[in-house]
Image: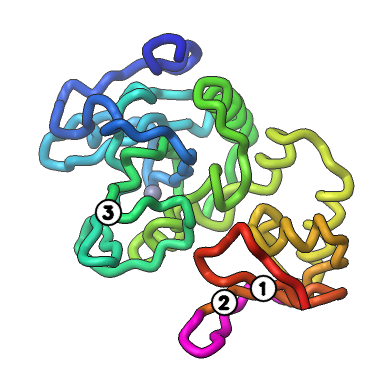
Amino acid sequence: MANDGWCPFATQRPITNSGNFETGRGGNKVKAVVLHIGEGPLSAFFPTFNNPARKASAHFTVGKKGEIEQYVSIRDTAYANGLRWDNGSWRNPRGILVTPAWRGLINAVNPNYYTLSIEHEGFFGEAWTEPMYLANLKLLQWLRDETGLTYARGETLIGHNDFDNIDRPNCPGPNAPFDRMLADLNGGDARRAALLAGANKLGIPLNDQSALAKFALQNNLGVPLSDEFQFQVGATPYLAQVWSQAVVYVKIGDWGNPQRT
Ligand SMILES: [Zn+2]
């Protein structure tokens, strides 16, 4: 990894308070980049992250004018995506039980150790400025080069809400342009774009990187007619989705073995 984990085109503002981040990643590999909205101005981030009373930090903030600030090396652990394992469940920093949507979580290991965090200036109800979008994109490209990640929505490119559905349901919120990012990061794919647009037309927020959707796409099962839903056979929980040619389903946790009706 080049540059000791410091981005060459970011403004480097290293946190000097050692209680707000951790050196190294406890031996873990980066599994995902997590996007946040800061609910405040760019000027507020560094003072917050350098305040020993806050025990908070992110690796980066992207500003509305396209500024990029970095506070923690990507080799080190920032404190933006924390969850606490408690006897088989996850709790958020307030100690409240959460049900994370992200399937990359490692039981009992705080996700801060295997994620990177990008904060964004502004409020969740605001549209992203074009300079902020482009700076964020450039940063994601650099992070991909540094980590070897392949970006997929819900897997390796996620939101804070994918960890904490209770206190952070709108971080980064509906204005974070994930679909555009993925299209720009992964190259234009007309078939994929048509599918996403078609699903959107039906009111279905399709995650085409989920296990079920990937399986349906590989097997040419048409278009999704429902969101993902759960059902049970005896005590065994399944996740399913209705596609126009079949219902696809998978035993929860056995993500590599989807089936079709
Ligand atoms: Zn957040």
Question: Which segment did they paint magenta?
Answer: 226-236
- Judge the density around disc 1: few (<14), some (14-19), many (≥20) Cα neighbours within 10 Å: many
In the foreground, 237 or 75 = 237
Q: Residues within 10 Å of mark 3 (few under 14, many from 20)?
A: some
Q: Which disc, if any, is residue 108?
A: 3
Vertical order, 105 against 117 (above or below): below
C-alpha separation, residue under disc 2 versus residue under disc 3: 23 Å
Q: Write the residue at 64% across / 59% down.
A: 211
Pick the residue in front: 136 or 191.
191
The residue singled out by tag 2 in the image is 238
Marks 1 & 2, CB-CB < 8 Å contact? yes
SS label for mark 2: strand
Residue 186 rendering spot, x and y as whole percentages: 72, 35
Q: Looking at the picture, which amino acid does disc 2 mark?
A: Tyr
Please give the name of the residue rendered at 71% of the width and 56% of the height, measured from the top-left corner: 208
Identified by mark 1, the residue type is Tyr
Secondary structure beneath dot 3 equals loop
Amino acid at the residue labelled 3: Ala
**Left or right: residue 81 compared with residue 193:** left
Spatial CA distance of label 3 from label 1 is 28 Å
Q: Of callouts 3 and 1, which one flags the residue occurring earlier in the amino acid sequence?
A: 3
x and y percentages locating residue 72 in the rendered image: 31, 25
Q: Quadrant of the N terminus?
A: top left
Q: Mark 1 falls on what kind of element?
A: strand
Tell me which residue sits at (57%, 72%) in the image: 251
For marks 1 and 2 on the same chain, the one whose residue lies earlier in the sequence:
2
Q: Taking 219 as reference, is 96 left or right? A: left
Which quadrant would the C terminus be assigned to in this image? bottom right
Is 177 in the magenta?
Answer: no
**Picture quarter containing residue 71?**
top left
Q: Which residue has dot 1 on it?
A: 249
Relative height, residue 45 to residue 198 (above, below): above
